Image (cartoon, rainbow, N blue to C red):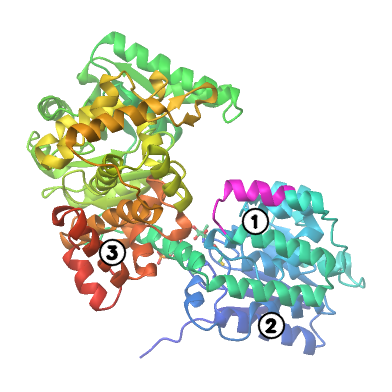
Amino acid sequence: MTVPSPPAVSSERIGNVLVARIDNPPVNALSRAVRAGLMDALHRLETDENVAGLVIAAGGRMFSAGADIDEFNGEIQQPFLGDVTDRLEQSSKPVIAAIHGTALGGGLEVALACHHRIAASGTVFGLPEVRLGTLPGSGGIVRLPRLVGIDQALAMIAEGRRIGAEEALSAGLIDRVASGDLMEECVALFDEIAGAAPPRTGDRPFPAFNAEREAAARTALAKKYRGQEAPQKAVDLLAMAARTPMSEALRLEHETCRALLSTAQSRALRHLFKAEREAGKIADVAEDAAARSIDRVGIVGTGTMGRGIAITCLDAGFEVVLIGRSGESADLAREAIANIYASTVRRGRLNEQDVADRLARLETSHSLDRLVETDLVIETISEDIDAKRAVISAIDAIVPDHTIMVTNTSFLDIEQLARATKRPANFAGMHFFNPANVMKLVENIRTEAASDDVLVTLMAFAKRLGKTAVMVGPSDGFVANRMLSKRTREALFLLQEGATPHQIDRVLTEFGFPVGPLALADMAGLDVLAATRRARAATMSKREREADIIERLVVAGRLGQKSGAGYYAYGEGRKPQPDPEVETLLAAHRAERGVGARTISDDEVRERCIFAIINEGARLLEEGVVARPGDIDVLWTKGLGFPAHLGGPMHYAEEIGLPHVRTALAGYAATIGDEYFKPARLIEQRADGSGRFA
Ligand code: COA
């Protein structure tokens, strides 16, 4: 027997008030069934003489997360949400929105069209469409400024800013925050407003939006959201709405939102929205694998990574035991962490009490014995396999059976490290990015023996730290560094062949990276990168070893930003300036290697840097090191600066076409070398087939 599914919108009568309740788990997305259900409720409101007014409410944990994102890939079916909101606003009988949890996108647009809005305390409001490369299309842009003014509307529409109930109340977005039962207060409001004409948001005047304010908004948004179309379109639409009659403005708003949905940028951002949520699910663990509980975290190693990870854990509410090599290094680390927190207080991000609470949860020590009550230990000592093995086996001897041990290595052989413990099922990797308390990404690394519940725990732990995590398998440099190393290789080859640091960085920042790879290298420290090159020399080709530009810069005392010079010279304000000395150094390098400098086109620079990454990504998929192309895209956009509006390297490759990528790779294989650019088998196959990696 098939059980009929419950209606997406159910109705009940409370006295002469009709209550329409949205029920479309998990987030009450406004799918076609919900829109149709709301239309039915409106019909009943209009036609049933015994009904004096309508409350729109929702079941579950939120009012609504807005339009159903899954519908955006095809033809959206009627009734459109704009038809619902227009009819709502025009109703001659009052309609009240009873809002709880979250009202986002179309969910907020429904509320804006209602005549009154009451919210439960703790409700969050927002129009996040811009983050999906589109904009509100059902009256959000035309109605919101009429309630909250132009500045708040700009922040919410063009930047996707979310606000809480108290701010929504003071901004004029809602009428009340319920102090007791939300529904009772909504029903009671009908008595207060009986006989009054329903106040329509659209009848309010649109606030002034002068040319000066408009220009300032455009400039600020262009800087903050470089290369993104939707924030600029938001300004266009607000300016349009300020001078256009309501019904025409609604039509234009809807049209623009629909047009934006079919842009490459919106496809890319929607792909990332889905990919981020999928990345949290590990492909092949037992369904019943449950996360272990983590309260107390041990961190071994007090360098930059150890400190950064400690701060992240303290911020997330964990108790932390930070172990240094000596009492002195442990004390220094505590002092450094306290200093970082002090500057957070100066910047107004935390108050003294927040910091005191965090520091009270931090224990520092030089004795590994203090790890005895931890649930998870993160080893963060320097990248030396023997030293790490020794520390891991010492940790193993102290911690209780249930404790999970992870290493924060960025490229060492994780299986070898796992063998340093007697409990390899409890061991895995967590690769944090520097600075760990700022970067929002963690690469979790599974080992052959790691148990399913350990893997699930690490994903949940990363989430509690407020990070996006991607699960990858063992491989040299895992996914992030293995792909990144191909870009670094090409940057060095390009310099050798005649490009300048400035050309390479300019091309990649024009592509959308916030910083170019060479300016980034200067930030990381060229001595650090030279050490990594030394450690990895055995895995490099002769040409790569001989492209020893970093080593030469270091010998010349150019260690990067910290020494005032690296690939660039740094004056006041740390702005990188092209430096003739680097040109001389590059010329000497070329002469010694017998390479003549040539003029290299920007297209070649871009393709070699980006396609080398894509090709390596395809190999990682082929080898099963990473489960989904979307995982690679999440990793690059969250952690490595790949522009989100291009969707990540794998999505970008699909958008520009795998046949095109294959042809370009084959061309560079012929000129630069097969060993660097031979198209990955997966690209060969998919270019002829689906054109997709998934
Ligand atoms: N349409 C369709 N599905 C949606 C959705 C939407 N607007 N919003 C969320 N979902 C789905 C997610 O994909 C996820 O699906 P999954 O369980 O199959 O992976 C599920 O709902 C839960 O979402 P998740 O983000 O994991 O839950 P959360 O509690 O962390 O966050 C929100 C909830 C609503 C804050 C968050 O999902 C969100 O910001 N959604 C987007 C809202 C939006 O952009 N609306 C405008 C659309 S134009």
Q: CA distance from mark 3 to mark 1?
A: 37 Å
Q: CA distance from mark 3 to mark 2?
A: 57 Å
User: For the residue labelled by badge 2, is the local secondary structure a helix, a strand or a loop?
Assistant: helix
Which residue carries the number 1 mark? 158
Most extreme residue toward the top is 328
Specify the quadrant that holds the N terminus.
Answer: bottom left
User: For the residue labelled by badge 1, is the local secondary structure a helix, a strand or a loop?
Assistant: helix
Which residue carries the number 3 mark? 664
Residue 225 magenta-highlighted: yes
Q: Amino acid at mark 1?
A: Ala
Left or right of 340, for residue 416: left
Asked if one can make out residue 467 in the rendered structure from this viewpoint, the answer is no
Left or right of 569, for residue 167: right
Region in magenta: 216-228
Circle 2 Cα neighbour tier, 10 Å, few/some/many (<14 / 14–19 / ≥20): many
The residue lying toward the viewer, choosing from 442 and 650, is: 650
Left or right of 9, for residue 3: left
Specify the quadrant of the image occupied by residue 527.
top left
Circle 1 Cα neighbour tier, 10 Å, few/some/many (<14 / 14–19 / ≥20): many
* Mark whose residue sits in front, 2 or 1: 1
Q: Position of residue 448 (x, y in %)?
A: 11, 50
User: For the residue labelled by badge 3, is the local secondary structure a helix, a strand or a loop?
Assistant: helix
Q: Amino acid at mark 2?
A: Ala
Asked if one can make out residue 202 in the rendered structure from this viewpoint, the answer is yes
- Residue found 66% across the figure and 54% down from its top: 156
Left or right of 499, for residue 396: left
Specify the quadrant of the image occupied by residue 532.
top left
- Per the rendering, the mark at residue 41 is 2
Q: CA distance from mark 2 to mark 1?
A: 32 Å
Specify the quadrant of the image occupied by residue 381.
top left
